[in-house]
Image (cartoon, rainbow, N blue to C red):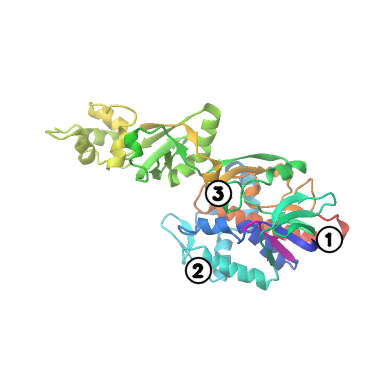
Amino acid sequence: MSATHEIAIIGSGPAGLMAAEAAATAGARVTIYERMPSPARKFLLAGRGGLNLTHSEPLAGFLTRYSEAQAHLAPLIESFSPDALRAWAEELGQECFVGSSGRVFPKSFKASPLLRAWLRRLEALGVELRLRHEFRGWDAQGRLRFETPEGESLVEANACVLALGGASWPRLGSDGGWVDLLLAEGLSVAPLRPSNCGFEVNWSPVLKSFAGFPLGPVTLTGAGRSLRGECVITDYGIEGGAIYTLSAGLRDAIERDGAAELVIDLRPDVSHETLAARLGRPRGGQSMSSVLRKSGGLPPVAAALAREPGPLPADPAALAERIKALPLRLTGVRPIARAISSAGGLRFDDVTPDLMARARPGLFVAGEMLDWEAPTGGYLLQACFASGRMAGQAAAEFARSAPAHDKV
């Protein structure tokens, strides 16, 4: 089978859908191709516990969350800011609110109502959605190749936006299979690595029995950063919001050194001196477990964690030091398939400011396929939306002059 379209969007996650909306709003004829039986599966999963669209912090601070990629992403996010994203959601009938942490959610707290309204808007714009189309690259004539249940489909397009996601949660559609396709086109791709991920720890059998227990609020220090937050003990190690925020530096340390040290302050609201004084009170007949609970203020999971480095010190000052600066050795990074997101991707040096591949005019790339990473908290989706919008607008502009260009 073969077909010709003005713009082909490959991938129906938030970056792909936003690219389709931007291109269609600019007057282009748009078709979305998706390998899965339904669109935006990872987007729906991300919203299962509450769809965190973006964050309310001032834009200057917001942009620093993208670290090395800030210079490249800043123009995209400034052109489609967190405020613009909130306004866009509300145009779809999804009023937003700011949570106590500054994160922005739709009042429905779910992804499905927003997605349904979004798909209706795209349909009204004339956007077609073709499911079970797996992208296989280009043929000798430069046509897009798709594997479908009916066999191979070849598509000519005046412009194309790739928004195939990273490599986390591959069962939902983003498996990083596009890396070799881009490398074959002469493009440079930074290796895909887990981001916003958990870490492995060689727990004792006692600590493993606390798998699933939350820990916090605590202060975590690792890879040159400290922050206060919460995490969760797992049977393999540790994960959770505060861990995810530190994950890039911890991952890099493990890749470089084979392990990383994480220091946990189990009682961040109490000074070392105050804690030592409490622990030094006469114990009477109390067990150490009772002392940790009553004088140390530690719940059972924290008390068990305090024992992990070895026998507890008898000296109150040394015991307070153990509680305030508990060393934890991280021995490994959880697989990318279990990470919330992925780092790496098409290097920004290989794309123009409007996200067109320099080696292949008319090919645009958006979302997690680009080489950036950010913590959870709304920063991931914001960059996906903003880059998708930029790529869609640029693809529409390119397609308007398509007769002067070769097909993608």
- In the foreground, 363 or 55: 363
Residue at 83% across, 60% down = 401
Residue at 37% across, 43% down = 211
Disc 2 marks a residue whose amino acid type is Glu
Picture disc at residue 169: 3
Disc 1 marks a residue whose amino acid type is Ser
Nearest to the eye among marks 2 and 3: give it.
Answer: 3
Estimate the spatial distance between the alpha carbons at disc 2 and disc 3, rounded to whole Å: 29 Å
* Residue denoted by label 2: 95
From this view, report whether residue 195 is shown above or below residue 114.
above
Residue placed furthest toward the front: 150
Residue at 65% across, 56% down = 35
Residues rendered magenta in the picture? 30-36
From this view, report whether residue 131 is shown above or below residue 327.
below
Determine whether the residue tagged by mark 1 lies in a helix, strand or loop: loop
- In the foreground, 225 or 59: 225
- Image x and y of residue 213, in percent: 35, 45
Q: Give neighbour class at mark 1: few <14, some 14-19, many 20+ (Cα, 10 Å).
A: few
Total numbered labels placed on residues in the image = 3
Estimate the spatial distance between the alpha carbons at disc 1 and disc 2, rounded to whole Å: 38 Å
- Image x and y of residue 359, in percent: 79, 45
**Rendered-image quadrant of the C terminus:** bottom right
